[in-house]
């Protein structure tokens, strides 16, 4: 009986010791388009459309450090969104998601990030998706990267405050004029 007690204590110590365990926690993420101006200054009440939802995971020592996991998940999601915005034009005309938007060590980072062509998706969402306002000439939008979930997940990165989408861009992604 006494031989079983040290083994049981060793097992309990291993479970309680944060350095021994390893865990992960996640946050939700997406892009938000906020309409700023239509056709050279026509007033618009705040209208927001979302696209590109994904999850991001962070790793930490144990459940006792769960907030550190979520903080890392949030940071990795925002890094992905910033890198994709920075590289939205692609390389030699090929638009694809950057390395920051793939899973990283031990499955940390974005888990289900599906966007390849961010520029086209911004233009499509702002001009031809359900809920997008009609415009005759152009629309100016603010693009935000947002995260949410449990503690330490909430955050917003403003990627641009003045992205202009013209009728020509709209027609290229939707095949019709956006003011119709």
Image (cartoon, grey):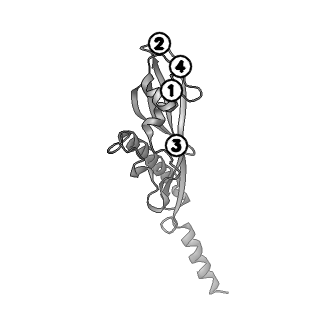
User: Which residue is disc 4 drawn over?
Assistant: 134
What's the distance in space between the residues labelled 1 and 3, CA to CA?
A: 22 Å
Q: Secondary structure at mark 2?
A: loop
| 106 over 118 or under it: above or below | below
Question: CB under 8 Å between callouts 3 and 2?
Answer: no
| 64 over 78 or under it: above or below | below
User: Which residue is disc 1 drawn over?
Assistant: 127
User: Which residue is disc 3 drawn over?
Assistant: 29
- Residue drawn at x 45%, y 30% is 172
> In the drawing, does residue 161 fall left or right of residue 58?
left
Which numbered disc covers residue 107? none
Mark 1, mark 2: which one is toward the viewer?
1
> Residue 91 falls in which quadrant of the image?
top left
**Residue 58 image position (x, y, % from top left):** 49, 54
The tag earlier along the polypeptide, 1 or 4, is: 1
| 70 over 20 or under it: above or below | above
What's the distance in space between the residues labelled 1 and 2, CA to CA?
A: 16 Å
The tag earlier along the polypeptide, 1 or 2, is: 2
Question: CB under 8 Å between callouts 1 and 2?
Answer: no
- Residue drawn at x 50%, y 33% is 32
């Amino acid at each position: 009986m006494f031989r079983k007690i040290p083994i049981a204590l060793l097992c309990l110590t291993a479970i309680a010791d944060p350095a021994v365990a390893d865990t992960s926690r996640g946050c939700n993420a997406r892009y938000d388009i906020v309409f700023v101006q239509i056709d050279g200054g026509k007033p618009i009440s705040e209208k927001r459309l979302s696209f590109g939802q994904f999850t991001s995971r962070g790793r930490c020592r144990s459940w006792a450090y769960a907030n550190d996991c979520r903080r890392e998940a949030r940071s990795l999601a925002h890094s992905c969104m910033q890198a994709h915005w920075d590289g939205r034009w692609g390389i030699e005309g090929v638009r694809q998601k950057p390395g920051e938007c793939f899973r990283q060590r031990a499955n940390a980072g974005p888990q289900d990030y599906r966007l390849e062509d961010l520029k086209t998706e911004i233009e499509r969402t702002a001009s031809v998706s359900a809920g997008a306002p009609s415009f005759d000439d152009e629309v100016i939008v603010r693009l935000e990267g947002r995260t949410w979930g449990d503690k330490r997940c909430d955050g917003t990165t403003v990627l641009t405050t003045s992205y202009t989408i013209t009728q020509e861009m709209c027609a290229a992604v939707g095949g019709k004029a956006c003011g119709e």
